[in-house]
Image (cartoon, rainbow, N blue to C red):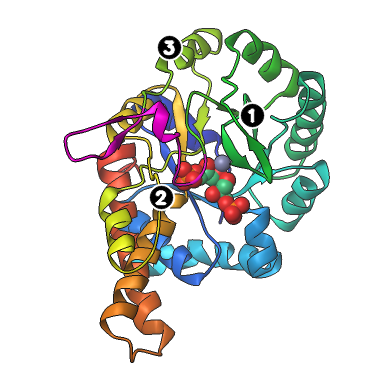
Amino acid sequence: GLVNTKELFTKAMAGKYAIPAYNFNNLEQLQAIVQACVETKSPVILQVSSGARKYANATLLRNMARGATEYAKELGHEIPIVLHLDHGDSFEICKECIEAGFSSVMIDGSHLPYEENVAITKKVADFAHSQKHYVSVEGELGILAGIEDDVVAEHHTYTEPDEVEDFVKRTGVDSLAISIGTSHGPNKFKPEQCTRNADGILVPPPLRFDILEEIEKRLPNFPIVLHGSSSVPKEYVQMIEKFGGKVPDAVGIPEEQLRKAASSAVCKINIDSDGRLAMTATIRKIFAETPEEIDPRKYLGPARDELKKLYMHKNESVLGSAGKA
Ligand code: G3H
Ligand code: 13P
Ligand code: NA
Ligand code: ZN
C-alpha cells in the first residue's frame, strides 16, 4: 500500500539524499514515474495538484496511484510510494484528499499572513495526524517568485530563518517547504538576473544556500522540501524549438546545486516542468518527422519512454535516491 513520508525522510536525512516528488496528470506520466523508480530502486512521492484533479478527475487519479503499488510489484521490485497532494490551498481540499486515501498532503499557506499560515497549517496537521493511518503534512514558509497557485509574485520572498522554529513547533508539520531562489515553470529567473556562458546559454544566480544553512541550524535534522527544482535541460528546449515550439528565456536550477541540496536537510525535491519539456520535445519531433502518425500510442509511448529515462537520470545522478528502496 501507500506510505507516508515519515520513514522515507528519516532515511533520506541520514543517507544524505532526497526523495523525488514527481507530478502526474495522466497514465503515461504515472507509468514513466513508476517504471523509472522501480528500475532504479528508488522510493517515490507521486504528486497530484489541484489542477491535476480538475484535469483528470480526482477519483481516477487516486485509484491510479493506488494501482501503482501493485504495478511496481508486477514490474519486479516493491518500492515505497507516497500519494501526496501538491499545493493544497484550503483545509477542505486537504481533508477531502486525506479521507480519500492520500498518505501525505501539502497545505500551502505561504501567501497568507504568518499567523493565518500557522492557523491553517496546524488545522490540517491536527486532522491528518489524528487519522488511523498517520498522514504526513508539508507546510511552506516564504514565497517562490513566478506563478504559484494562480498567484504571481514578482520577486522571491526568501524564507525567514527566524520564523521556522516557531512555525514547525506551533503547527506540528512533518516537513517544511522553503524559498531559497527556486521557482515554478521553465523560466526560473529573468534574463537580466543571469549571466551568459560562451554558448549564449543563460546561467542563473546560485540558490541561497546561506539561508538553507541558517534554517538547518534552527531546525536540526528536520526535513526540508524544495519546490521549483526542474533543471530545464537545454537539450529539450533546443529540441522543442527545432520542431516549431517556443520556450523563451528558459532557465532552470543547475544539477550541481540540486546535488548539493539533496546532500543537506533537503529530503524532497519537486520536479514537474522537466517532464513536461521531455514529453513535449518528443511529441513535437514525432509529429514533425512522421506527419501521417495518428495513433496516440505512437507518440505518447515514446514520450513516456523519454520521461522514464529523464527520471532514472534524476534518481541516479542528481537526487541520490537510486538503490534506496
Ligand atoms: O506546482 C506546480 C506543479 O508543477 C503543478 O502544476 O498546477 O499546473 O498541475 P499544475
Ligand atoms: P518545477 O516547475 O520546477 O518542475 O517545480 C515543480 C513543483 O514545485 C511542483 O510542486
Ligand atoms: Na537530503
Ligand atoms: Zn511546487
| Residue 232 can be seen in this image | yes
Mark 1, residues whose alpha carbon is within 10 Å: few (<14), some, or many (≥20)?
A: many
Which secondary structure class fits the magenta region best?
loop
Using the numbered discs, state the Cα–Cα distance from disc 3 to disc 2 in whole angstroms. 30 Å
Query: Dividing the image into four equal quarters, which quarter contains ligand 4?
Result: top right
**Marker disc for residue 140:** 1
Q: Tell me the element at label 3.
A: helix
Q: Amino acid at mark 3?
A: Asp
Closer mark to the observer between disc 3 and disc 2: 2
Residue type highlighted by circle 2:
Pro
Mark positioned earlier in the residue sequence (3 or 2): 3
Is residue 21 in view?
no
Q: Which residue does the numbered mark 2 point to in the structure image?
A: 248
**Number of residues whose C-alpha sits closer than 10 Å to that of mark 2, classed few (under 14), some (14–19) or many (20 or more):** few
For the point 82% across and 25% down, the residue is 116
**Residue 220 screen position, x and y as percent:** 50, 12
**Lower position in the chain sequence, tag 3 or tag 1:** 1
The magenta stretch spans which residues?
184-204
**Residue located at (34% from left, 64% from top):** 281
Callout 3 environment at 10 Å: few (<14), some (14 to 19), or many (20+)?
A: few
Considering only vertical position in the picture, is 129 above or below 185?
above
**Is 121 on the left-hand or right-hand side of 270?**
right
Q: Between residue 232 and residue 65, name the one nearer to us.
A: 232
Amino acid type, residue under disc 1 in the picture:
Glu
Q: Find the residue positioned furthest to the front.
A: 192
